[in-house]
Image (cartoon, rainbow, N blue to C red):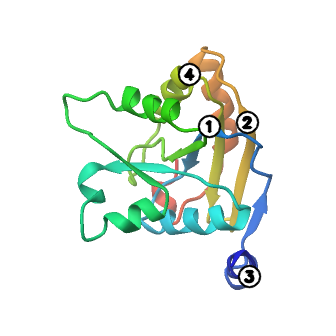
Amino acid sequence: MRKLYKFLYFKILAWKLIGEFPNVDKCVVAVVPHTHWLDFFLGLLVRKVINEEINYIGKRSLFKPPFGWFFRWTGGAPIDRSKSSNTVESIVNIFKERKVFRFALAPEGTRKKVSELKTGFYHIAVMAQVPIVAVAFDFGKKQVKISEAIYPTGEIQEDFKVFHDFFDGVVGKIPEYSF
């Protein structure tokens, strides 16, 4: 099956893959930019191309019938996103419970244009004591770029300069919404 995914990605879609996914069992995967619902399916395809288990979270209601099986099958983990729950803490607990958990999310927090990344992904990595892997979906260059493992120092402003540099110039599916 992996040959099929690679054929689709490299030959049919004619995309490139820049970098290799680091050899880590646990990490936060920060994917930028998130401008369109198709980003989810590109992520699923890339995950098969690189042959890595990469997870995500979704609101608990998504994991109920009739589609709950799909979200679990694609690596999803349900989470209570109500006002009374602490999402960062809930995700950190998932890291503690699992031997392998590579948690992908879009740090913009929306598919619309933003000027700053939200900080939740960073705080999750710090609290879970895991690295961050930056992944850029660049529709302008038709490439997915993967960083090395980035270990947060606790100096958020300095660390965010690294992320801003990595994502600089990346164009999303909807260019005007790009970070």
Give whichever of discs 3 and 1 has the lower sequence position.
3
Q: Which residue is mark 3?
A: 7
* Residue 169 point in image, percent of width and height: 65, 50
- Cα distance between the residues tagged 1 and 4: 10 Å
Q: Secondary structure at mark 3?
A: helix
Q: Which residue is mark 1?
A: 27
Q: Which mark is residue 149?
A: 2
At label 4, the amino acid type is Val
- Cα distance between the residues tagged 3 and 1: 27 Å
- Cα distance between the residues tagged 4 and 3: 37 Å
Q: Which residue is mark 4?
A: 126
Question: In this orientation, does residue 7 appear?
Answer: yes
* Vertical position of residue 115 compared to residue 32: above or below: above
Crowd band around label 2 with a 10 angstrom C-alpha radius: few (<14), some (14–19), many (20+) = some
Frontmost residue, 66 versus 10: 66
Q: Check if mark 2's residue and mark 1's residue have beta carbons within 8 Å.
A: yes
